[in-house]
Image: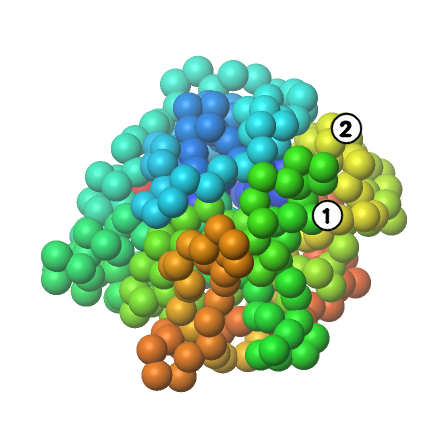
Amino acid sequence: MKQRTKVIIDTDVDFDDYMAIVYLMQNPDIDVIAISVTGCGAVHLSKGVENVANLLTLFGNHALKLPVLRGASAPLSFSNVFPADVRNGADLHYAAAFPGVNPSPAIYEAQSWLHDFFMHNDEPVTVLSIGGGTNFGTLFRSAQQNPALKAKLQSGIQQIVMMGGNILPRDISPGAMGNIIPTLGDNVIYRNEVAEWNIFIDPLGAQLMFESGVPLRLIALNATNEVPLDQEFVSKLNAINTPQAKFLSAVLAYPENAAGIGTYLSFWDPLAACTIPLPALVTTEAFKLYVCQELNEEDDQSASLIVDSKHGSRIEVAIAANADAVHAEFLRVLSLPMPDTRHCTGN
């Protein structure tokens, strides 16, 4: 029997995070062992923990005790936040109904659980980072003062797959500009034209992940821009008659999400998730990168990715993607029957 890939998901529980989480929970080749929540991105922390705990009711009683980790409520640097309408929608889980309320969720403090897990874990784990770098950046910062933990993280984390960032046109063609202003609509509260949201939320957290010494594959806007969230995909998803597909269809039908289908929404986090079992879905190139930490309100370049062969960390960056193959893979997994009791075993 093929050994399943163990995955820890770190999420800010946005609409596309639900897509990524459901895809991995439904995938027979994946064993999700914990989900850590950050309150620094789309969702507020307490609502995010509650929503993830209740999301587990989609996957049967055996999933209810999957560890849900309560992470950071504030970033390590700056105080950038999503607009209120985005956060409100995330808190309300986009009006999509969960099958039920998790009666006794297994909720842990993220840093304590992650420390204990990696100090005692001997099996390779993949981390899917789809909520910014705060939770794992905090863990790696702690490891800088704890050589034993640092060694365990570097040996225990097989890879980090992180949705975030973009390589600007001056560095590679085709390039991708940032997605801060395009997703704000008329509510332009930031004048940053180069950053991507996950890294913009906490540039220091992302940099700590970059320099952790753990192999990191970055699913950048260069790749996600090639996989649109369009009406053809949504129609095919709506035709799948499983509870998981119906839940995601309801999430995407939320008015603010529906307005972006076929326009500005891309397959951001689910593309990152799909590359865990199928890395060939994206084309990658290695760069030496660091995350710009300087905030200049007149010309804000903070959270942009700087290519620097001397000071950067080696990062494998997804610069292109096969949209048809990505859509087909996602829909294939969402069409599968309910995962059996071998899944979601936790720690």
Color style of the picture? rainbow
Residue located beneath label 1 in the image: 265
The location of residue 317, given as percent across then percent down, is: 53, 71
Residue at horizontal 47%, vertical 20%? 102
The answer to whether residue 140 is left or right of residue 37 is: left
Q: Against 334, is 103 above or below?
A: above
Assess disc 1: are there few (<14), some (14-19) or many (≥20) residues with their C-alpha within 10 Å of its C-alpha.
some
Quarter occupied by residue 288: bottom left
Q: Against 82, is 325 above or below?
A: below
Amino acid type shown at disc 2: Pro
* Numbered label attached to residue 163: none
Is residue 218 visible in the rendered image? The answer is yes
Amino acid type shown at disc 1: Leu
Assess disc 2: are there few (<14), some (14-19) or many (≥20) residues with their C-alpha within 10 Å of its C-alpha.
few
Is residue 206 visible in the rendered image? The answer is no
Q: What element carries label 1?
A: loop
The location of residue 166, given as percent across then percent down, is: 57, 65
3D distance between C-alphas at marks 2 and 1: 13 Å
Choose the circle earlier in sequence order: 2 or 1: 2
Residue located beneath label 2 in the image: 255
Name the residue at the bottom extreme: 309
Residue at horizontal 26%, vertical 41%? 111
Total number of numbered discs in the rendering: 2
Quarter occupied by residue 318: bottom right
Q: Against 174, is 39 above or below?
A: above
